[in-house]
Image (cartoon, rainbow, N blue to C red):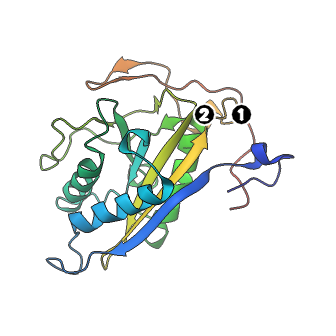
């Protein structure tokens, strides 16, 4: 994925898609009921194609259905795949809290958000997140469900994004990107300027430079 208003390949590159997979739930409770094991297989297949270990995922961008059943199953599938990542917390986000449900465009919306997060090495906040669904099991799970923008603490990183179809389609893509400090404007991603302990990790809030060009015009 590249910008067209840059002179060299390094400047044009926005992010690299290094792995992807699509599968289907198969037999489940109903047409719309999610299937955790199928979601796990989809995540693992994408990561395998990319040659990734769980510890290498910096940000997990969830589909985030916002339903009592869908969210626990998605987070549970992600937890089971990522459970061996050690104590280094993974930032967990969902674009639906930022720009709503884009329906058929939800997947590409998640990818666009991941590109922006990777360019700033910043986990975008989950807006209006006050409580975690009590059916989501997060005990012993090194994940950071952020309620404000946080610095990922690295200059290069991986973001995995999931998207689901109403009929049981599961999709996953893994993207690699690097920080472009000074390229994203602070106000473009709505940064705050404080840092505080978030229970499982210290989240350093990103402080970016001057405004740069807008979003890419070529994918």
The total of numbered circles placed on residues is: 2
- Element under label 2? helix
Q: Which of 155 and 49 is in front in this view?
A: 49
Relative image position of residue 65 (x, y in whole percent): 30, 61
- The residue to which callout 2 is attached is 187
Where's residue 25, x and y in %?
Answer: 27, 75
| Circle on res. 91 | none
As displayed, is residue 217 above or below residue 9?
A: below
Residue visible at 73% across and 61% down in the picture: 218
Residue 146 appearing in the image: no
Q: Residue at x 52, y 39 (%)?
A: 157
Binning the other alpha carbons within 10 Å of mark 1 as few (below 14), some (14 to 19) or many (20 upward) gives few
Where residue 95 appears, as percent x and y from the top left, is 43, 52
Residue denoted by label 1: 211
Nearest to N terminus: mark 1 or mark 2 = 2
Q: Position of residue 79 (x, y in %)?
A: 25, 48
Label 1 with label 2: CB-CB less than 8 Å:
yes
Q: Which residue is drawn at 13% across and 77% down?
A: 29
Q: In which quarter of the image is residue 139?
A: top left
């Amino acid at each position: 994925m590249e910008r067209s208003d840059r002179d060299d390949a390094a400047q044009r590159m926005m992010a690299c898609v290094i792995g992807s997979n699509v599968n289907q739930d198969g037999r489940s409770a109903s047409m719309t009921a999610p299937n955790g094991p199928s979601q796990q297989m989809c995540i693992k297949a994408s990561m395998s194609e990319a040659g990734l270990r769980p510890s290498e995922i910096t940000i997990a961008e969830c589909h985030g259905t916002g339903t009592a059943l869908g969210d626990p199953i998605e987070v549970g599938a992600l937890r089971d795949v990522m459970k061996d990542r050690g104590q280094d917390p993974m930032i967990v986000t969902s674009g639906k809290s930022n720009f709503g449900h884009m329906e058929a465009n939800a997947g590409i919306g998640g990818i666009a958000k991941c590109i922006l997060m990777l360019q700033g090495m910043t986990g975008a906040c989950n807006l209006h997140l006050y409580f975690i669904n009590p059916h989501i099991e997060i005990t012993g799970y090194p994940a950071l469900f952020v309620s404000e923008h946080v610095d990922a603490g690295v200059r290069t990183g991986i973001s995995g994004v999931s998207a689901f179809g109403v009929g049981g389609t599961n999709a996953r893509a893994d993207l690699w990107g690097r920080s472009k400090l000074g390229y994203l404007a602070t106000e473009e991603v709505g940064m705050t300027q404080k840092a505080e302990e978030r229970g499982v990790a210290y989240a350093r809030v990103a402080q970016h430079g001057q405004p740069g060009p807008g979003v890419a015009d070529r994918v």
